[in-house]
């Protein structure tokens, strides 16, 4: 059995992005210990800068989609970055911005990318059992976000923007709650 949510991301008021009409995320939590995320950006894709693959670090400085995964009631969380180049990065944090990159290949998400003139799709599968033995059955809080780069600069998108400046690490932005699996 799968739990499914369709969510819109909202642009932070401090940024503009004429080339983006909408960003939607379909979230599915399956009983197979997977978190499936499908990011759908509608807009003028030719105006969005997509960097060629590099070393996979600091993907958040360019166009990328993100998922922040925390267990309900815990300060610790993981940050996943998914770039349209196919690159990915995972960070583990003990508390707000206190953590580091994870280089363990067992954390590798599955990523599929599709693009047309008006749509960019990034489908990912996060294996919850790679985070911990507890994650697959725990109640989770998710923060979903996107950074879109164009010649006009960066625009910041999220489920919720709890601060005057874009800050995807703010736990108040982990706005989607997924119940535990039995």
Image (cartoon, rainbow, N blue to C red):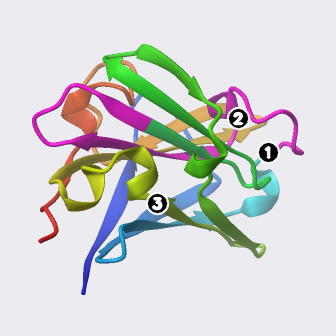
Q: Position of residue 80 (x, y in %)?
A: 52, 43
**Which quadrant would the C terminus be assigned to in this image?**
bottom left
Whichever of callouts 1 and 3 sits on the residue coming sooner in the sequence is: 1
Q: CA distance from mark 3 to mark 2?
A: 25 Å
| Cβ atoms under marks 1 and 3 closer than 8 Å | no
**Which quadrant would the N terminus be assigned to in this image?**
bottom left
Q: What's the residue at 76%, 36% (across, down)? A: 56
**Is residue 47 within the magenta segment?**
no
Q: Position of residue 149 (x, y in %)?
A: 69, 39
Q: What's the residue at 26%, 36% (across, down)? A: 173
93 sits to left or right of 171: right
Classed neighbour count for the residue bearing mark 1: other residues with Cα under 10 Å, few (<14), some (14–19), many (≥20)? some
Relative to 100, residue 33 above or below = below
SS of the residue at dot 3? strand
Whichever of callouts 3 and 2 sits on the residue coming sooner in the sequence is: 2
Instruction: Please state which of the two labelled residues, at mark 1 or mark 2, is closer to the viewer.
Output: 2
What number is the disc on residue 127? Answer: 3
**Residue 179 in view, yes or no:** yes
Residue holding disc 1 = 49
Residue holding disc 2 = 62
**Is residue 66 within the magenta segment?**
yes
7 sits to left or right of 72: right
Q: What's the residue at 39%, 23% (across, down)? A: 93
Q: CA distance from mark 1 to mark 2?
A: 8 Å
Q: Position of residue 119 (x, y in %)?
A: 66, 72
Relative to 99, residue 161 above or below = below
Q: What's the residue at 46%, 36% (across, down)? A: 79
Range of residues picked out in magenta: 49-78
Taking the view exactly as shown, the residue that stands out farthest to the top is: 98
Q: Position of residue 121 (x, y in %)?
A: 63, 69
């Amino acid at each position: 059995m799968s739990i499914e949510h369709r969510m819109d991301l909202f642009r932070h008021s401090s940024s503009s992005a004429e080339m983006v009409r909408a960003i939607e995320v379909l979230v599915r939590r399956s009983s197979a210990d997977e978190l499936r995320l499908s990011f759908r950006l509608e807009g003028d894709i030719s105006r969005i800068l997509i960097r060629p693959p590099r070393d996979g670090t600091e993907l958040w400085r360019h166009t990328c989609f993100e998922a922040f995964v925390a267990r309900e009631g815990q300060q610790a969380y993981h940050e996943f970055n998914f770039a349209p180049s196919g690159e990915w990065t995972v960070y583990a944090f003990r508390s707000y911005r206190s953590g580091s990159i994870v280089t363990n290949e067992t954390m590798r998400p599955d990523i599929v990318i599709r693009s047309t003139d008006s749509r960019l799709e990034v489908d990912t599968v996060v294996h919850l059992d790679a985070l911990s033995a507890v994650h697959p059955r725990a109640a989770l809080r998710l923060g979903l976000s996107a950074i879109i780069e164009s010649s006009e600069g960066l625009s910041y998108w999220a489920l919720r923007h709890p601060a005057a400046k874009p800050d995807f690490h703010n736990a108040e932005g982990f706005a989607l709650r997924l119940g535990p699996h039995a």
